[in-house]
Amino acid sequence: MLSRLLLATTNRGKIRELVRLFEGSGVELLLPERELDVEEKGGSFFENAYLKAKAYYEAFRMPTLGEDSGLVVPALEGYPGIYSSRFYSLEWGGVEPLEGSRDRANIRKLLRLMEGLQDRKAYFLTCAVVCLDNAGLWAEGRCYGEVLREPRGEGGFGYDPIFQPEGYTKSMAELRPEEKDLLSHRGKAIRRLLELLKMLK
Ligand code: ITT
């Protein structure tokens, strides 16, 4: 199994969770010494994860993990989906003014578009891709649930305050970090990826 992995991400929420998820795995995570501006021009979570991993791999020449994730709402044609991080700024559904953080603006827009909607089903998805010298690995994880009518809780990041996982009465942002890791899309994808990494010589 490899011992070091470069993280091709600048999202602090993701980094915090990835560090927790790799704890005790024997794989040391490294942060890039400079940020690359990778255009996420793919049409799927997989393509975008691959584009990020590949760009950092080519710049730093070491095993690299890229991940693309987001919240999919079937009743909204799959939006925010691959546009989750900049959903507020999309023409689709109307641009939401950026007052405060991006996360808050994204949440305001999603709640506005879902006002009065009965079908609130949604899922988070993470696609994680590892670029190695002569190979690539990928894994996906999903977490099903529904979109709440107002934000609750201070934990996590992104859309966590308005997402309630199936079988729970708390929002993702009200769960303890270890609880989120157990059921989250990212937790599932990374545990699967670790199994695949263990199969490498
Ligand atoms: P990098 O490309 O640098 O990794 P990013 O924030 O641009 O960072 P993505 O394009 O993958 O990453 O967008 C992910 C967005 O999806 C993120 O900004 C959140 O809005 C949302 N998201 C992903 N995982 C989440 C989680 O566990 N909880 C809540 N929201 C999440």
Image (cartoon, rainbow, N blue to C red):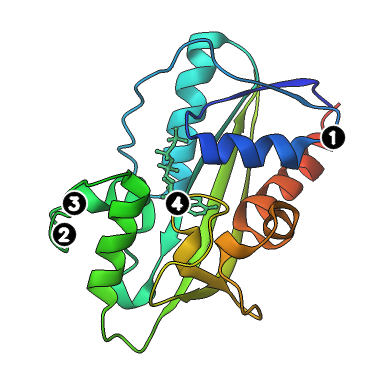
Q: Determine the CA span between mark 1 and mark 3.
A: 39 Å
Q: Give the labeled residue for mark 4.
A: 158
Q: Determine the CA span between mark 2 and mark 4.
A: 19 Å
Location of residue 14 (image quadrant): top right
- Asked if labels 3 and 2 touch by Cβ distance under 8 angstroms, the answer is yes
Q: Determine the CA span between mark 4 and mark 3.
A: 16 Å
First in sequence: mark 1 or mark 3?
1
First in sequence: mark 4 or mark 1?
1
Q: Residues within 10 Å of mark 4 (few under 14, many from 20)?
A: many
Give the quadrant of the N terminus: top right
Up-down: is 100 above or below 123?
above
- Asked if labels 1 and 4 touch by Cβ distance under 8 angstroms, the answer is no
Q: Residue furthest bottom?
A: 118
Going by the numbered disc 2, the residue's amino acid type is: Trp
Going by the numbered disc 3, the residue's amino acid type is: Leu
Residue 66's x, y, as percent? 54, 33
Give the quadrant of the C terminus: top right
Residue under the image location 73 percent in, 40 percent down:
20
Question: Does the beta carbon of the residue at mark 4 sit less than 8 Å from ligand 1?
Answer: yes
Q: Determine the CA span between mark 4 and mark 1.
A: 26 Å
Q: Determine the CA span between mark 2 and mark 3.
A: 5 Å
